[in-house]
Image (tube, rainbow, N blue to C red):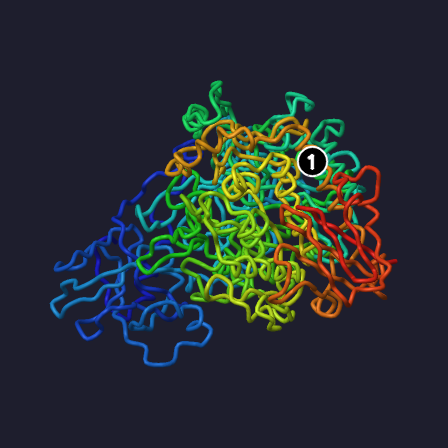
Amino acid sequence: MAGKRWVAGSLGSALALTCLAASAAPTLADCDGPFAAPLHAAPAVDARAYWLNRQLIKWPGVDASRGVFKLYFSSNALLRAAPGARVSGEDGVLKLARFEGEVPAAVAQRFKFTAEGVVFNVAGAAKLMTQQVLLVQEADDGAVIATTSLQIAGALDDLYANAARADDLGATVTANALRAAFKLWAPTAQNVAVCSYASGAGKATAITPMQRDDATGIWSANAQGPYYQYVVDVMTPSAGIVRNLVTDPYSVSLTTDSKRSYVANLNASRLKPAGWDSTPSPNKVAAQTDMTVYELHVRDFSINDNTVSAANRGKYLAFTEAKSNGMKHLAALSKAGMTDIHLLPVYDIGSVPEKACVTPAIPVADADSDAQQAAVAEASAQDCFNWGYDPFHYNAPEGSYSTDPADGAKRIVEFRQMVQALHKTGLRVGMDVVYNHTFIAGQNEKSVLDRVVPGYYHRLNARGDIERSTCCDNTATENLMMGKLMVDSVAFWAKNYKIDSFRFDLMGHQPRAVMEQVQARADKAAGRHINLIGEGWNFGEVADGARFVQASQLSLNGSGIGTFSDRGRDAVRGGGAGDSGQQLFTQQGYINGLVYDANAQAGQRPAADLLHASDMVKVGLAGTLRSYQLTTADGNTVALQDIVYGGNQPAGYASEPGEVVNYVENHDNQTLYDINAFKLPQSTTAHERAQVQMLGAAINAFSQGVAYFHAGFDILRSKSLDRNSFESGDWFNRLDWSYQDNYFGTGLPPVADNGKDYALLKPLLRNENIKPAPADIAYARDAFRDLLSIRSSSTLFRLRSAADIKQRLRFFNTGPSQVPTVIAARIDGKGYAGARFKTVVYLINVDKTEQRVTATEERNRRYQLHPVHTNAAAADKRVAAEARYDKLSGTFTIPARSAVVFVEN
């Protein structure tokens, strides 16, 4: 039928003559063929028009006053439409009439981001979805004026909305354990089959055609496993019709390097460690504000720990070795009050070779040498390390952390053993999840979603290219089935792996409505509340609600979902996440010398800068609540939402304290110890630097909301000044659970992200004053645990509601006459469940010298030091020896660089 022309209006007869499959059905040989085989090549064409729904097409920006508009289609991708020539290769054509009515409100809202343009009526969209389709503007003589392909998400979501109700996508083991039911959503495919393999590496044993359900676009078949792939014949935006050999988007496990999907019954006893069903999650978090989180990378945890068996280093099973230094460290944190371990991505990632990854040999070199980073960079594509923000399969455990990635069952069992071991240690388990982008898209070998339904799962710009504002290929969770995939995936992990909490990378790129679906589904699947937190940054193509109401800081209030706050973070550290060059020195923060201890490069800043930083620290301590009233440095009392942050944002943005995550360090950017290497005066001793680190810990521990800490923060972790260690290898990401080294001064960090500042970094790395001794590390370790114990001792540091905070938390030492280097607050515990104390007063002195603060309203109280301070094992002996409260005057005396808590019983 190629080349035949069909008359406008005869769509039904035209399509009746067009078979769904334009090519011969795949054979067994295709199961062992290339990952992509062209069937009918076609040139790429911009997709500047939109299927708004099954009936409406919009072409933004086109001049509608010229010529006529037609929709051409070809099942064999033979369409060609060059400007000035006539269209050729069509199976049929529709002459389009302009739509003069009102676009349905929901559709108009969804596509509000598109430019003005003409809208057309069209019928028969379902049949066209499997074909090459071009929208053409023609002159009266049939010559092409302009042409475009179409973005398909609107039509697919309208046509196949019933697919969102499916609860069995992927492979489901049948009563006959040798077979499984396979279901794949592929509404634009012309043909789909499932390939069966007896092993992860052998040739295919069978190919089974799949049947399409026209109501949902889901293809299904019963076939053998245990390993499988799909063969999908589909029209692609870039290459015409392609036969894709592709893994399952709903894979629950895979073989080495994710070459094949694995069939697994996750309820089978052989996939459960002994006691799995009876090992409960720790009951430590009654409210989201109870969460105190330690963010940890699986490989970092044990690769450098020689007390872990060699076979298990860098693996899930390292967590099962309870007598290792690392597990003893986690157990001590748990005992002190840590509630959650948040694991950097542990789903299947695309960047680490699961077989034969290499560990580079690092040369012995000077503290400021570039030789170490050169060795790391040379091996970066083949080494065993990556943070993992490169999702390949969302529902499968990463194979490089398994002792045998070739065995699809092994990684399931070992992941569960890890979770079980942490639960037994009293620690809940959280996952860092990255639904905002995929590792890659298009027709690349490690593209999954975009080779099953090309052009659907990713967010596209006005030309039809994939948006990449998140660094990689952005997904479109506003599209029904991508949103469903995220919802299904979180529920899957919560149910099948007992995951207690989730941290969403770049959550502001997700719709709030879908995140609320995630919450409801995860809670239902787990049979308990699952805690959700994430990055609510507002940027990119979705910024300021351009496409939907985002799951961002300013848009999530009232949802109960927590977002990371940069308000307190930036005030504590100084400057911002993107600082470089001299800014790294000049932008001092509240704890590292702003005004009161200027470094050589900073110069003398105005006193008002320190007062403003003090106010911003208080914003964080008050839970970043919109409505909390604070007396600021100018003497005015205002709501936190009326304090300006960053030039144009409200400092207070949360409705409830559980909606804010407080932190001063995480995996991103320099560690606090490293940023303080820039900001503190160079003469600052290593022990004083440890004290400053614990000031940051104290502010975080005392802030209302979720407390979040980066692994190693408590042992002065350094990455040798690396600002972005995502692929900096084990060398720059090491942890030392023997507490002998923090790895400062172990070479210049990788040149890609740090090279422009090498001249500034070299003198710091050579400065022996900066590198801590084991005694300094031990002090920080123990002081941190003391702070955890104080936070966990009373719900007053974890108040449940905004009303509680407004009623019970009061700052003193405020206004223009304050001692600007001291934060002082009182929390009323009278009648409050879990308070333990009648009153709590905390004071944080960031200055190098002892300070006194008088609060006449605090006279004649019965304040005593918190029991943690007076314990013989307390890390900071100065507090018990030097901190005082004078009841006659209401004066508190606080040692230099210390955090002190007084209580009243």
- State left or right for residue 644 relative to residue 43: right
> Viewer-proximal residue, 417 or 866?
866
x 77%, y 68%: residue: 857
Q: Residue most toward the front? A: 889
Which class describes the residues within 10 Å of circle 1: few (<14), some (14-19), or many (20+)?
many
User: Taking 378 as reference, is 25 above or below it?
Assistant: below
Q: Which residue is mark 1?
A: 418
Q: Nearer the viewer, residue 653 or 846?
A: 846
Q: Position of residue 698 (x, y in %)?
A: 68, 49
Task: Classify mark 1: helix, strand or loop.
Answer: helix
Comparing 879 with 710, the one in front is 879
Horizontally, residue 796 falls left or right of residue 653, namely right
Q: Position of residue 590 (x, y in %)?
A: 57, 52
The residue located at (45%, 76%) in the rendering is: 105
Q: Looking at the image, which residue is at 75% across and 38% down?
A: 875
Image quadrant assignment for residue 182: top right
Please identify the residue farthest to the bottom as the structure is shown. Answer: 101
Q: Amino acid at mark 1?
A: Met
Compared to residue 675, the image places residue 326 above or below, namely above
Residue 9: give x, y in percent of width and height. 28, 71
Please indicate, yes or no, whether residue 173 appears anywhere in the rendered image.
Answer: no
Which quadrant would the C terminus be assigned to in this image? bottom right
Q: Is residue 784 above or below residue 643?
A: above
Q: Name the spot of residue 695 as percent of width and height, x first.
A: 65, 47
In the rendered image, is residue 510 in sight?
yes
